[in-house]
Image (cartoon, grey):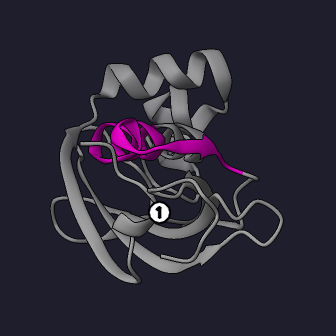
């Protein structure tokens, strides 16, 4: 079943995961996209303010996106996103973390310029197995309405 705008009432939407993150995965991502020492080298990472090897915040955002896609966006009548309103990295991503994604709909409104669509704003939080929140993201997604007519449902 394809999810449409009407399937996203305000409030808690769902939880997705877990997603295990390995040391090798952290280093591979950092090697290609964010080669800072705290993401690549355990000794250098111990000397950093993070006090140990940690994944890039951009790696964490990529993991969140994958978890969102696998959890619900892949079956949503999504037309894309106008961007990300907010991203906050709260705690480091560590090798061996098991991630859980919690998704809340903070706003859902019919588009004034394209009434056959709606804009659903999600607040997504990723936490590790011990419940520590690692990252929060607020992002709108443009979603087709069920009947596509532009009439209020």
Above or below 103: residue 24: above
Q: Residue at x 44, y 75 (%)?
A: 105
Q: Is residue 43 left or right of residue 8?
A: right
Q: Nearer the viewer, residue 31 or 127?
A: 127
- Residue at left 47%, top 43%? 77
Q: Is residue 4 above or below residue 120?
A: above
Which residue is depicted at the point 62% across and 15% down?
32
Q: Nearer the viewer, residue 105 or 92?
A: 105
Instruction: Measuring from the top left, give residue 66's x and y in whole percent.
Output: 40, 36
For label 1, the SS is: helix
Let me know if residue 18 is in the magenta part: no
- Quadrant of the rendering where the N terminus is positioned: top left
Residue to which mark 1 is pinned:
5
By secondary structure, the bulk of the magenta-drawn segment is best described as: helix
Asked where in the image residue 125 lies, by quadrant, the reply is: bottom left
Kindly identify the residue that appears in the image at 62 percent across and 42 percent down.
79
Residue 17 position, x and y percent, is 19, 48
Nearer to us in this view, 144 or 45: 144
Residue 142, image x, y percentages: 63, 54
Give, as a single range, the part of the protein colored magenta: 63-81
Residue 78 in the magenta stretch? The answer is yes
């Amino acid at each position: 079943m394809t999810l449409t705008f009407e399937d996203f009432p305000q409030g808690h939407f769902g939880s997705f995961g877990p997603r295990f993150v390995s040391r090798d995965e952290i280093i591979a991502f950092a090697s290609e996209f964010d080669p800072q020492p705290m993401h690549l080298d355990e000794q250098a990472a111990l000397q950093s303010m993070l006090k140990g090897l940690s994944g890039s915040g951009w790696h964490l955002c990529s993991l969140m996106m994958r978890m969102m896609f696998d959890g619900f966006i892949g079956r949503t009548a999504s037309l894309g996103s106008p961007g990300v309103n907010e991203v906050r990295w709260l705690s480091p991503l560590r090798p061996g973390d098991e991630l859980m994604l919690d998704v809340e709909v903070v706003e859902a409104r019919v588009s004034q310029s394209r009434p056959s669509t709606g804009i659903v704003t999600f607040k997504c939080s990723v936490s590790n197995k011990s419940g520590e929140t690692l990252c929060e993201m607020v992002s709108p997604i443009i979603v087709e309405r069920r009947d596509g007519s532009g009439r209020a449902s």
